[in-house]
Each structure stands twice: as C-alpha cells, then as structure tokens.
Image (cartoon, rainbow, N blue to C red):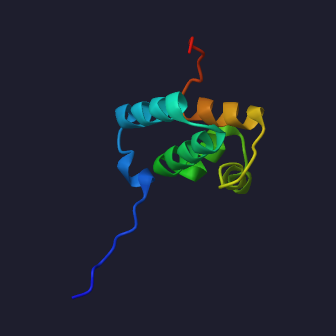
C-alpha cells in the first residue's frame, strides 16, 4: 500500500487575521530576511495576490518576483506590501 503525501502549503493555514498576525510576529521575532520575505509571500497568497497588487500599487508580476525565493526586494517594496496587508513593522529592544 503506497503512502499518499499531500503537499503542505502555509498559505492555507493562514485563515484568519489573528493567525496571520501571530505568524508574522513569530517570523519577525525569530526570522532572517529570507524567512520574512517567505512569510510575506505566504500571507500574500492567503489574502490574494491580485488584491494585494491593487492595494500596494505594485504590479502582480512584480509582486510575485519580489516575494519569490532568493529575491532581494527593496525596503520600499516591503513597506508597500506590509502596509497593504495591514501589518506593521516595529522596533523593540532586543
């Protein structure tokens, strides 16, 4: 009997604003730049890339490129994405 493996998609787990905020908070606390970009990609897919592109003022293709693995988006792009997602970047004493 063969095992059936279902691919895991983090975006499917992000089904409420509370879950999204907690997920992003944890990634920001523990993550590095690549992990933060990956988390933003998961959140963007959970919310809908087309809607995010419209709200951020970025093109959909540009958004996909900026949030793809090994991307190095400009800080301005990260700010546009986080603001359009309703997320804040904040500073706290480490």
**Is 7 placed above or below 25 here?**
below
Q: Residue at x 55, y 35 (%)?
A: 85
Q: Residue at x 65, y 46 (%)?
A: 53
Q: Residue at x 66, y 38 (%)?
A: 56
Q: Quadrant of residue 28?
A: top right
Residue 45: x %, y % from top left: 52, 52
**Is 43 placed above or below 65 here?**
above
Q: Kindly give the residue lying farthest to the left in the view shown.
A: 1
Query: How many badges with numbers are in the image?
Result: 0
Q: Which of the pair 8/63 is nearer the observer?
A: 8
Q: Which of the pair 29/41 is nearer the observer?
A: 29
Left or right relative to 60: residue 14: left
Instruction: Residue 86: tell me if it is visible.
Output: no
Instruction: Residue 40: tell me if it is visible.
Output: yes
Residue 87: x %, y % from top left: 54, 28
Q: Which quadrant of the rendered structure holds the C terminus? A: top right
């Amino acid at each position: 009997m063969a095992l059936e493996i279902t691919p895991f998609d983090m975006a499917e787990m992000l089904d409420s604003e509370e879950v999204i905020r907690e997920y992003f908070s944890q990634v920001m606390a523990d993550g590095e730049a690549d992990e933060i970009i990956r988390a933003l990609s998961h959140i963007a897919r959970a919310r809908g890339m087309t809607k995010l592109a419209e709200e951020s003022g970025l093109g959909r293709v540009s958004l996909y490129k900026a949030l793809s693995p090994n991307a190095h988006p400009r800080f301005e792009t990260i700010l546009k994405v986080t603001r359009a997602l309703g997320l804040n970047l904040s500073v706290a004493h480490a």
